[in-house]
Amino acid sequence: MTTQTMANNQLHRYLFEDLSVRGELVQLDDVFQQIITSQAYPKPIQTLLGELLVATTLLTATLKFEGSITLQLQGDGPVSLVVINGDNQQKVRGVARWQGEIEEEANFHQLMGKGHLVITIEPKKGERYQGVVGLEGDSLAQVLEGYFLRSEQLNTRLWIRTGEHAGKPHAAGMLLQVMPDGTGTENDFEHLEQLTNTVKDEELFSLAANELLYRLYNQEKVQLFTPQAVEFKCGCSRDRSASAIIAIDKEQINTILAEEGVVALHCDYCGTTYSFDSAQVAELFENQSSDRPTLH
């Protein structure tokens, strides 16, 4: 068996050569752990973040251009926001907002309440697209399946799992979709759907892609493509924090310095805090008109 480290933090694309159906498989451990350890997320919110992370990664695999996809759950429940952003290079980040106590056994709808899923596609060249879909269904996977059926008229199924393996949180998932060339049949898709329904969490979390696909589809001709690494990438930096400080009124910054002794900016995506003392802040404002907006 391929080692666990090779099986995780990768996205695999595959194709059923005789059935005109394509598939994707993503297995995440370190990337998922980096996202959920940036804040003290309750367990049900960790699960939501994992599910949205898997879904975003699977959807970014459909991008045929340079750009990004953002999946954003918004609701009036205890969890007001869950967002994951990913790009065509599979660099991802995510955050959630919540209030009050979160029940350990809370389900998808109890967490989000009434709300919607916003899917934003931003190509580096071309027009930005945004789709909004209600939270219909018992899970995020069902919400997304409904979105694909309505927006693209393509049969699509998702399997999204989160849990523990080898003492660490894992998130993984699979996607099947009829190819848009029109040659795939309903029976072909249903056959593969039934086979994929047998996948176990342990298999998704631990098996190498070729072994997992062989277990599920050993009677089919499956073409497995070169995997793509998935990486946590926040995007925050001390430079960006410095730029944010000098964009604020100087008197307001001086008030914060007088009260706190430092100006501190905290990144919710990765948990990093960038602190600037009075001397550093003074230098930022002195250099505001130059090309050197920050200190190192």
Image (tube, rainbow, N blue to C red):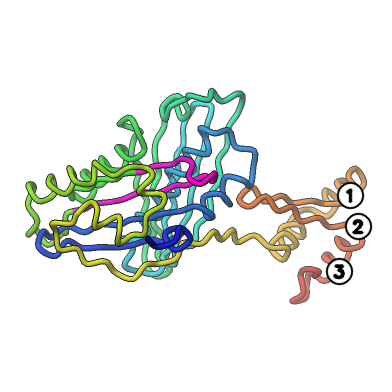
Q: For the residue labelled by badge 1, is the local secondary structure a helix, a strand or a loop? A: helix
Dividing the image into 4 quarters, which one contains the N terminus? bottom left
In the rendered structure, which disc, 1 or 2, sits on the residue that comes first in sequence? 1
Left or right for 108, reference 145: right
Of residues 170 and 115, the one nearer the viewer is: 170
In the rendered structure, which disc, 2 or 3, sits on the residue that comes first in sequence? 2
Residue that numbered label 2 is attached to: 278
Q: For the residue labelled by badge 3, is the local secondary structure a helix, a strand or a loop? A: helix
Which amino acid does the dot numbered 3 rest on?
Glu
* Magenta stretch in the rendered image: 160-177
Which amino acid does the dot numbered 1 rest on?
Leu
Q: Residue at x 33, y 59 (%)?
A: 209
Q: Position of residue 105 (x, y in %)?
A: 48, 24
CB under 8 Å between callouts 1 and 2? yes
Q: CA distance from mark 2 to mark 3?
A: 12 Å
Question: In the image, which is nearer the foreground, mark 1 or mark 3?
Answer: 1
Of residues 152 and 91, the one nearer the viewer is: 91
Q: Residues within 10 Å of mark 3 (few under 14, many from 20)?
A: few
Q: Disc number at residue 257?
A: 1
Q: Position of residue 232 (x, y in %)?
A: 54, 59
Q: Residue at x 24, y 41 (%)?
A: 197
Residue that numbered label 3 is attached to: 286
Q: Position of residue 160 (x, y in %)?
A: 36, 43
Which amino acid does the dot numbered 2 rest on?
Ser
Q: For the residue labelled by badge 2, is the local secondary structure a helix, a strand or a loop? A: helix
Left or right for 201, reference 235: left
Q: CA distance from mark 1 to mark 2?
A: 6 Å
